[in-house]
Amino acid sequence: MNLMSNGLWNPSSPVWLAIIIATVVYWFRFGSDRRRAVAFAAAMFFLAMAFLSPLGVLSDGYLFSAHMTQHLLLLLIIPLFITLSLPDPEVFAERVSPQTLAILHRIAIPSVGWIAGLGTMWFWHIPSLCNAATEHALLGFVRSGTFLMAGMLFWWPVYGPVMKSRLPSPAAMIYLFSACLGCTLLGIYITFSTVSVCPAFANPTDRIGILTMLYKSGFTPRIDQQLAGLLMWVPPCMLYVGAILSVLCRWFAEDHPTSEVETPPLKGSTSQ
């Protein structure tokens, strides 16, 4: 199958413009650290995949599983890499105005981040809202924007470069573990629900001629929803577990800082 000719790529999307602008701004503001620049490049890559690739096209009213994958990228993966791409606290404080730092400290409240991260995903999967956002482009744009903003609020208390906003390591692990439970419950609900969570994907219009092929191979809307539920259930918790382990390592490093230990002189050596 020729993916381009069948409309499974979207190279004319305005997301390209957003990626270019974000890259230019990041490069002039924070681009001196190559390691962190790689994290930003990863964020832009996943943003392109979320909207410009076949994943982005199939998520637009074709496959609920593609829709779920796109939302996980927007809520968890892209904001995580953007947060990790920001410089160390000292450098960040030098390159951001004090007013901006004060605003970030006020809005980056862990309870707000947790509610935003979990609440946004639950909210947009209320059947009526999910259906409306899938069928109306403007509402879909608002939904995507809320996912990105909620994701930034969620990851900021864990990896943000403003130390005052960071949770202590034990609290951060509880924060992440409870988020894992929230994703698990939503994933279970979607996987085992007997009704369509997003009716727009129950009987989609096959505009590009791919759904007929999938349905003939046995990939029904019911299986599609079950796969979406598993995607909501398993990958996020694996990500949270990885984040918990990284916070645990950070906690250990804080409690056991490396220090230079003087090496005793060898026997028989003479001091100069």
Image (cartoon, grey):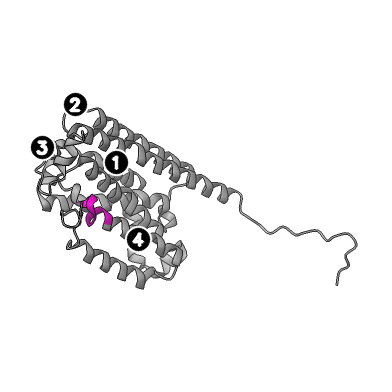
Give the structural element (helix, strand or loop) at label 4: helix
Return the residue found at the far right: 268
Give the structural element (helix, strand or loop) at label 2: loop
Q: Is residue 253 left or right of residue 122?
A: right
Identify residue type, mark 2: Thr
Which segment is the magenta one?
49-56
Task: Quickly name the residue at label 2.
Answer: 194
Judged by depth in the image, the label closer to the viewer, 2 or 4, is 2
Judged by depth in the image, the label closer to the viewer, 3 or 2, is 3
Q: At which x and y percent is residue 83?
A: 37, 56
Task: Quickly name the residue at label 1.
Answer: 118
Task: Quickly name the residue at label 4.
Answer: 102
201 lies above or below 16 = above
- How far apart are the two marked residues, 2 and 1, measured between alpha carbons? 23 Å
- How far apart are the two marked residues, 4 and 3, measured between alpha carbons? 48 Å
- How far apart are the two marked residues, 3 and 2, measured between alpha carbons? 15 Å
